[in-house]
């Protein structure tokens, strides 16, 4: 198993600016396979949250090499208006950077909305974590902007799955308010023969030791 930290994640050093694409990732995977002397051409893809969007995009990039796709509470199945505005639009990205640099106004609005029960507690906690610390905010801006090139086309991906008969296994938490399991319906509809959806009593943080056996079964089955 090879687990790759994306740019501005973990200990990865990235000197290519705020740009990372599926082609970049494919080149890196090929390099790792070569240096590790991995002879098998088959790839099992597993992606969690943002990694789900990356996995979907990579499937679209190299469909003939993917033997199985496992998605854990994946991003990318539904276009998020705010994410698209912040990353795909030049002026929106400038506004996003301004908010990152001076978040006080947005944070105050968020606190009021939370006090009035206008925002879900999980979402409030998630956003608060990413706002309260300057380094966390800076990392968020770099990560979102750098990963903007991963834009899976769900209709094309469904055709790829059906044409190549690629099994897809999906895992969600029924208490997840960040990425709800209902989003899976968009991918599954029409290709039910290749997709399986499993929903467990959990929130968004599914990639942990408590769910190890469940995830292993998704990879094996």
Image (cartoon, grey):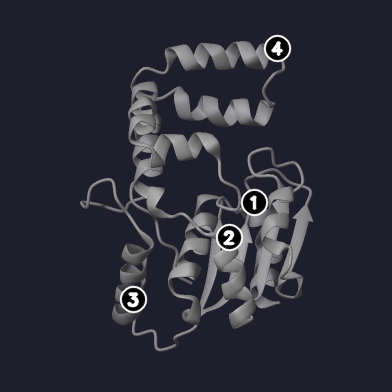
Query: Hey, which quadrant is residue 33 in on the image?
Result: bottom left
**Residue 1 x %, y %:** 48, 72
**Disc number lying in front (1 or 3):** 3
Quarter where residue 113 is shown: top right
Find disc 2 in the rendering and name its residue: 154
Q: Residue at x 39, y 84 (%)?
A: 38
Q: Looking at the image, is 128 positioned above or below residue 41?
A: above
Reading the image, the residue beneath label 4 is 116
Q: Where is residue 49? Give x, y as percent.
A: 56, 50
Marks 4 and 1, Cα distance to the nearest angstrom?
29 Å
Q: Residue at x 64, y 77 (%)?
A: 162
What is the distance, in whole Å, between disc 4 and disc 3 at their CAs?
Answer: 51 Å
Instruction: Name the front one of labels 4 and 1.
Output: 4
Q: Earlier in the sequence, mark 4 or mark 2?
A: 4
Q: Residues within 10 Å of mark 1 (few under 14, many from 20)?
A: many
Q: Secondary structure at mark 2?
A: helix
Q: How many residues crowd mark 3 within 10 Å: few (<14), some (14–19), many (20+)? A: few
Left or right of 188? Residue 159 is: left
**Residue at the left extreme?**
15
Is residue 178 left or right of 22 when viewed as pictured? Answer: right
Residue at which label 3 appears: 30
Report helix, strand or loop for mark 1.
Answer: loop
Judge depth for marks 2 and 1 and give the one in front: 2
Choose between 208 and 15: the one closer to the eye.
15
Near-viewer residue (119 or 4): 119
Front disc: 4 or 2: 2
Cα distance in 3D space between marks 2 and 1: 23 Å
Mark 2 and mark 1 lie on one chain; the one further toward the N terminus is 2
Q: Which mark is residue 206?
A: 1
């Amino acid at each position: 198993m090879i687990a790759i930290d994306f740019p501005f994640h973990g200990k990865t050093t990235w000197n290519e600016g705020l740009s990372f694409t599926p082609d970049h990732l494919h080149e890196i995977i090929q390099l790792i396979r070569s240096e590790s002397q991995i002879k098998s051409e088959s790839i099992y893809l597993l992606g969690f949250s943002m990694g789900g969007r990356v996995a979907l995009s990579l499937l679209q990039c190299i469909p003939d090499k993917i033997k199985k796709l496992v998605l854990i509470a994946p991003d990318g199945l539904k276009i998020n208006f705010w994410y698209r505005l912040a990353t795909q639009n030049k002026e929106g990205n400038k506004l996003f950077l301004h908010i990152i640099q001076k978040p006080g106004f947005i944070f105050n609005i968020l606190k009021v909305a939370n006090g009035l029960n206008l925002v879900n507690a999980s979402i409030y906690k998630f956003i608060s974590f990413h706002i309260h610390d300057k380094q966390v905010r800076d990392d968020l801006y770099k990560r979102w902007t750098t990963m903007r090139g991963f834009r899976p086309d769900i209709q094309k991906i469904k055709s790829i799955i059906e044409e190549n008969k690629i099994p897809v296994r999906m895992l969600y938490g029924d208490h997840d308010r960040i990425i709800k399991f209902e989003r899976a319906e968009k991918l599954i509809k029409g290709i039910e023969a290749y997709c399986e959806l499993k929903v467990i009593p959990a929130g968004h943080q599914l990639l942990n030791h408590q769910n190890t056996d469940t995830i292993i079964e998704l990879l094996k089955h």
